[in-house]
Amino acid sequence: MENAIRMAKLHTGRHKVLSAYRSYHGATAAAIAATGSRGVGPTSPR
Protein backbone atom coordinates (compact mmCIF):
# COMPACT_ATOMS: atom_id res chain seq x y z
CA MET A 1 0.00 0.00 0.00
CA GLU A 2 2.83 2.35 0.86
CA ASN A 3 4.41 1.94 -2.58
CA ALA A 4 1.04 2.21 -4.33
CA ILE A 5 0.44 5.58 -2.64
CA ARG A 6 3.89 6.79 -3.65
CA MET A 7 3.48 5.66 -7.26
CA ALA A 8 0.03 7.25 -7.52
CA LYS A 9 1.39 10.56 -6.24
CA LEU A 10 4.34 10.45 -8.64
CA HIS A 11 2.22 9.49 -11.63
CA THR A 12 -0.59 12.01 -11.09
CA GLY A 13 1.40 14.83 -9.49
CA ARG A 14 -1.32 15.14 -6.84
CA HIS A 15 -0.81 14.89 -3.10
CA LYS A 16 -4.17 13.42 -2.11
CA VAL A 17 -5.27 9.83 -2.60
CA LEU A 18 -8.72 8.29 -2.41
CA SER A 19 -9.32 5.53 0.11
CA ALA A 20 -12.34 3.74 1.54
CA TYR A 21 -13.48 5.10 4.91
CA ARG A 22 -12.81 2.87 7.94
CA SER A 23 -11.13 0.09 5.99
CA TYR A 24 -7.83 -1.69 6.50
CA HIS A 25 -5.05 -0.46 4.22
CA GLY A 26 -2.04 -1.95 6.02
CA ALA A 27 0.09 -1.33 9.09
CA THR A 28 2.57 1.29 7.83
CA ALA A 29 2.23 4.95 8.81
CA ALA A 30 0.98 6.07 5.39
CA ALA A 31 -1.49 3.21 5.14
CA ILE A 32 -2.86 3.91 8.62
CA ALA A 33 -3.26 7.57 7.72
CA ALA A 34 -5.26 6.51 4.65
CA THR A 35 -7.94 4.77 6.74
CA GLY A 36 -9.80 7.99 7.50
CA SER A 37 -10.53 7.15 11.13
CA ARG A 38 -9.64 9.80 13.66
CA GLY A 39 -8.93 7.24 16.39
CA VAL A 40 -6.48 5.28 14.26
CA GLY A 41 -2.99 6.54 13.67
CA PRO A 42 0.67 5.60 13.91
CA THR A 43 0.79 6.66 17.58
CA SER A 44 -2.58 5.26 18.72
CA PRO A 45 -2.64 2.23 21.02
CA ARG A 46 -3.86 -1.02 19.45
Image (tube, rainbow, N blue to C red):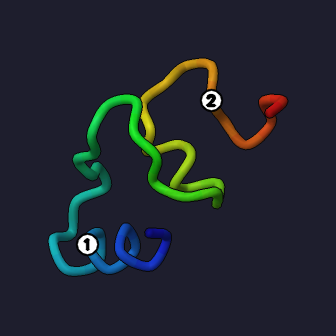
Q: Which label sits in the foreground, 2 or 1? A: 2
Residue 8 circle label: 1
Front residue (pair 25, 29): 25
Q: Quadrant of residue 20?
A: top left
Secondary structure category for the residue under label 2:
loop
Query: In the picture provided, is 46 more to the left or to the right than 24?
Result: right
Q: Residue furthest top?
A: 38
Specify the amino acid type for callout 1: Ala
Front residue (pair 9, 36): 36
Q: Residue at x 40, y 74 (%)?
A: 6
Location of the C terminus by quadrant is top right
Front residue (pair 5, 27): 27
Q: Position of residue 42 (x, y in %)?
A: 73, 43
Q: Residue at x 46, y 46 (%)?
A: 24
Total numbered circles: 2
Q: Residue at x 15, y 71 (%)?
A: 12
